[in-house]
Amino acid sequence: MKIGVIDLCIWLEEYQHDQAKFGELLAEWAGRDLKADYAVIYVREGEPLPDVAAFDGYILSGSELGVYDDADWMQPLRDWLIKAKEAGKPLFGICFGHQIMADVFGGKAEKVGPEEIGVRAFEIDGQTVTGHVWHQDQVTKVPPGAEVIGKADYCPVAALAYDFPAMSVQFHPEYAPDYVSTFLKRSKGEVLSDDDTDKAVAQFDASDVEADLFAKQAGDFFRAHLSEGAS
């Protein structure tokens, strides 16, 4: 099984010089449950989106941009997602990936309020779990044929399952607390205000979020549509 990880997030050398890139974090997280060959496509570093047929399935990362931004890679990504759907390729989106998938497939995502960053509680499959978040955009209209499978008090559409091979979540299951905390401390006053940085760092430093959060659900999703023996 070959899984392509579409990395749509800027990696900042001045703050993250000794840290893994986000696509690597996603591959490590997914690999905790799903045995596969993972390859990261660094779209924000100029790498082209792969031919849809190049991989058995795909994971889409978060991004510091929103679906409403006019970035040169945004429309090609939208077109690519439609082709991936038509080809029946399993798609798993995280944060921005969750939002762009909903926006492309008939729903809507938009900015809804102040930035949410830290640890939040979610209801998934009737259970309350905590997850790491960093976003101010949300899915505000559920796409046709999609089912809400996760929610939070502040985020009614926190996870979606589609009636074709697609699933997505608003939270960041790939985030390790020390990874984000280190970045925030290094970028204090630059990325967030001093006060907001301190509040977020305190939440990440006290986090009890499981490292394999939602990894089994993601693995089960891909296994349901693909054979682990695929090459």
Image (cartoon, rainbow, N blue to C red):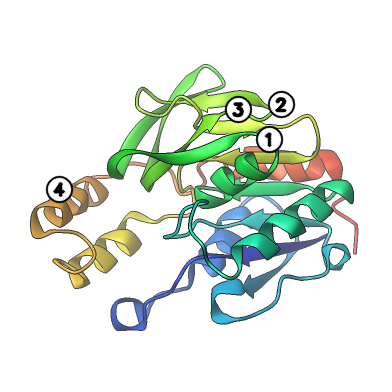
Q: Quadrant of the C terminus?
A: bottom right
Mark 4: few, some, or many residues within 10 Å (few <14, many ≥20)? Answer: few
Q: Of circles 4 and 1, which is in front?
A: 1
Amino acid carrying label 1: it is: Gly
User: Farthest residue in the top direction?
Assistant: 126
Q: Looking at the picture, how far across and down is residue 213, in whole percent? A: 50, 42
Upstream in sequence: badge 4 or badge 2: 2
Query: What residue is rendered at 72% in x and 32% in y?
Result: 162
Tell whether 201 sits left or right of 41. Answer: left
Amino acid carrying label 2: it is: Pro
Q: Nearer the viewer, residue 91 or 28?
A: 91
Q: Is residue 153 above or below residue 161?
A: above
State the CA–CA distance, disc 4 to disc 3: 31 Å
Q: Are marks 1 and 2 in contact (CB under 8 Å)?
A: yes
Query: What residue is rendered at 66% in x and 55% in y?
Result: 59
Mark 2: few, some, or many residues within 10 Å (few <14, many ≥20)? Answer: few
Quadrant of the rendered structure where residue 11 is?
A: bottom left
Query: What residue is rendered at 57% in x and 21% in y?
Result: 125
**Disc 2: which residue:** 144
Q: Mark on residue 142?
A: 3
Q: Nearer the viewer, residue 116 or 206?
A: 116
Upstream in sequence: badge 1 or badge 2: 1
Q: Mark on residue 106?
A: 1
**Disc 4: which residue:** 199
Q: Quadrant of the N terminus?
A: bottom right
Amino acid carrying label 3: it is: Val
